[in-house]
Image (cartoon, rainbow, N blue to C red):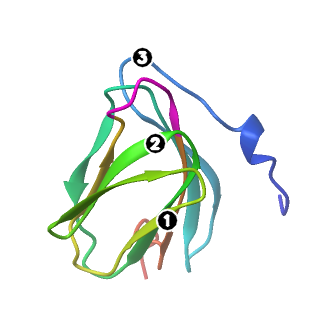
Amino acid sequence: MSFVIVSQQRRFAPDKMQKVNLFASPQMFCDVYCLEPGQAQKPHEHANATKFYYVLEGTGEFQVGDRTQMLSAGQLAFALPGEIHGVSNASDGRLVLLVAMGPNPNVKG
């Protein structure tokens, strides 16, 4: 599939953040993350990959390294290889993110 209507790929669940893969290749992957209020992706790092979060809808609190910042629709946060990063939805509304990382750490070799 070469074309994706991202708004039709959104999925939410009450128990945990949802990650919906839009596409993947050895060079990168791209997902849409859907977070209900109170949901989060715990801070973590990727030794050999760069990751970005682009806010499509809502407001989230993003951590990159030792910095934390609130971002809303149209804003982007990115983490270079080895930087700790994570996101939480501390708002009362849903948070939808476009997330990509390259190279794709899920592909071996």
Please name whichever residue, 109 or 42, is drawn nearer the observer in this view of the structure: 42
Q: Name the amino acid, label 1.
A: Leu
Left or right for 8, reference 46: right
Q: Quadrant of the N terminus?
A: bottom right
**At 31% from the left edge and 38% from the top edge, which residue is drawn?**
40
Dot 2 surroundings within 10 Å: few (below 14), some, or many (20 or more)? many
Q: Name the amino acid, label 2.
A: Thr
Dot 3 surroundings within 10 Å: few (below 14), some, or many (20 or more)? few
Q: Earlier in the sequence, mark 1 or mark 2?
A: 2
Please name whichever residue, 94 or 19, is drawn nearer the observer in this view of the structure: 94
**At 48% from the left edge and 26% from the top edge, which residue is drawn?**
93
Return the residue at label 2: 59
- The range drawn in magenta is 90-95
In space, the residues marked 2 and 3 are separated at their CA atoms by 18 Å
Check residue 96 for magenta coloring. Answer: no
Left or right for 65, reference 54: left
In space, the residues marked 1 and 3 are separated at their CA atoms by 25 Å
Q: Is the stretch drawn in magenta largely helix, strand or loop? A: loop
Where disc 1 sits, the SS reads strand
Return the residue at label 3: 14
Dot 1 surroundings within 10 Å: few (below 14), some, or many (20 or more)? some
Q: Are marks 1 and 3 in contact (CB under 8 Å)?
A: no
Residue 20, numbered circle: none
Return the residue at label 1: 76
Q: Name the amino acid, label 3.
A: Pro
Please name whichever residue, 7 or 109, is drawn nearer the observer in this view of the structure: 7
